[in-house]
Image: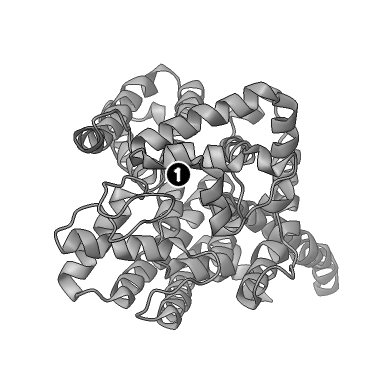
Amino acid sequence: MARLMGIFEDKNARRWLIAILAGSVVVRVAAAIYLGNQVVDLPGTTDQLSYHTLALRVLNGYGFTFPKEWWPVTAAGAPTAHWSFLYTFYLVGVYAVFGPHPLAARLIQAVIVGLLHPWLAYLIGRHTFREGVGLVGAGITAIYAYFIYYAGTLMTEPFYITAILASLYLALILGDRQSDVTPPERTGKLLGLGLLLGVTLAAAVLLRQLFLLFIPFLFLWVLWVGGRKRLAPLVGTGLVILAFILPITIFNYIRFNRFVLLNTNAGYAFYLGNHPVYGDRFIPILPSEMYIRLIPPPLRTLDEAALDQELLRRALIFIKQDPGRYLRLSLSRIPAYFMFWPSGDSGFISNVSRVSSFGLFLPFMLYGLFFAFVRQKKPVSGILADPSAFLWLFLVIYTLIHLLSWALIRYRLPVDAVLVIFAGLAVADIYARIFVSRHANRLPKIQHTMS
């Protein structure tokens, strides 16, 4: 028991953190080896086929094109911007050095994410709550089945989640006013933090452009909590993001002869996720041929960018014509997004991963979310300025984005990455109530006996 209590003591934090990081890497490397040197369509990993194929095409001089008609209706040899350029370049770089071996990319990714993901969970938990919460959050992250499963897949999820956590942590540090009492060089440090925040936000956006929708909320929270001194650092943050996005926007304009900020997938997703074919009950995954049939034949001859923009326009018309149906359809996505129970429609791996990760830790996540605010004795303004409120803000906004567009379990994983920190708070609180309180209650009796 004394050894368990050491988890919550600063002197043992480094030892526990190293053990957690080592264990995290080991299980993710094992998962990567299990996935192997082939790219096959496993549950929830269909995007692997696209990224692997696209990387090989780029490496062989064909550019961002596919050798045959590809999802959703991209013609053979036609330019595509549907997929993350950043992640494709990661695979291109690995294949250029090690040859076209998916296992090499899986292993490198597993090591990087295996170290950074739980480490960032630890940093956020420590900053928001205390050392022990950070360690428990890191420990849960290390063994969370979904994170282990996706760490070795050739998809954006592992790096995307890591970039999000890095951005959240840097935003928390940038908004922390306690350091304003330090000497004048603090201004330079704030600017440096702003630039670094820009890099992590740009990485997240280049991996999945949807994250752009959360950035304004992040900026507003940092400005509100940190005050006017954060304006200049945030301007630097914005300029860094723009510097990463602009070359891709120019590249897309040259290829499509029209404005495409980053990727041509928002219109597809919003149209296919809100089509009247659902009625007012969302179905997470339809047969792949159904998605193709939902795209009107006259539109299939358009290039990818033109089609994406037209589908977005039509999706907005669907909503305008029947906003009530859109609201009911959005609400119906809640079970699909927060699913934690086994399903007969899912395979063995999917059911085990779901129940042993989100299903197992959901009670602790809910406990931690509740306790994060109950523990505070502050006015409303003080509660909203608390770091835990910023994490709450991310959870709410990011969830709403998917409930209003398209909800899949794997789209929820960035939310899980933050929820495990609240689960860490719950475990730490329960431990303190049961074991630390019991130890404290026994102490006076022991002292009395000794006297």
Quadrant (top left, top right, bottom left, bottom right) of the N terminus: bottom right
State left or right for residue 175 relative to residue 327. Answer: left
Q: Is residue 244 above or below residue 222?
A: below
Of the residues shown, which amino acid type is indicated by label 1? Tyr
- How many numbered circles are shown? 1
Identify the residue at image location x=16%, y=64%.
Answer: 60
- Helix, strand or loop at disc 1? helix
Instruction: Give how far across and how far down residue 413 sits, in percent.
Output: 56, 55
Residue 341 in percent (x, y) is at: 75, 64
Taking 244 as reference, is 27 above or below it? below
Q: Is residue 266 visible?
A: no
Locate the C terminus and report the quarter of the image it occupies. Answer: bottom right
Near-viewer residue (271 or 191): 271
Give residue 44's quadrant in the image. bottom right
Q: Is residue 413 above or below residue 379?
A: below
Residue at 35% over, 26% down: 234
In the depicted view, which residue is nearer to us: 158 or 19? 158
Residue furthest to the left in view is: 61
The colour scheme used to paint the residues is one colour
Horizontal side of 260 relative to 376 (left or right) equals left
- Name the residue furthest top: 228
User: Looking at the image, which residue is at 40% across and 36% down?
Assistant: 307
Q: Where does label 1 land, which residue? A: 169
Please tell me whether residue 106 is drawn above or below residue 172 in the rendered image.
below
Between 265 and 448, the residue placed more toward the observer is 265
Task: Please identify the residue farthest to the front as the structure is shown.
Answer: 298
In the shown orientation, is residue 182 left or right of residue 138?
Answer: left
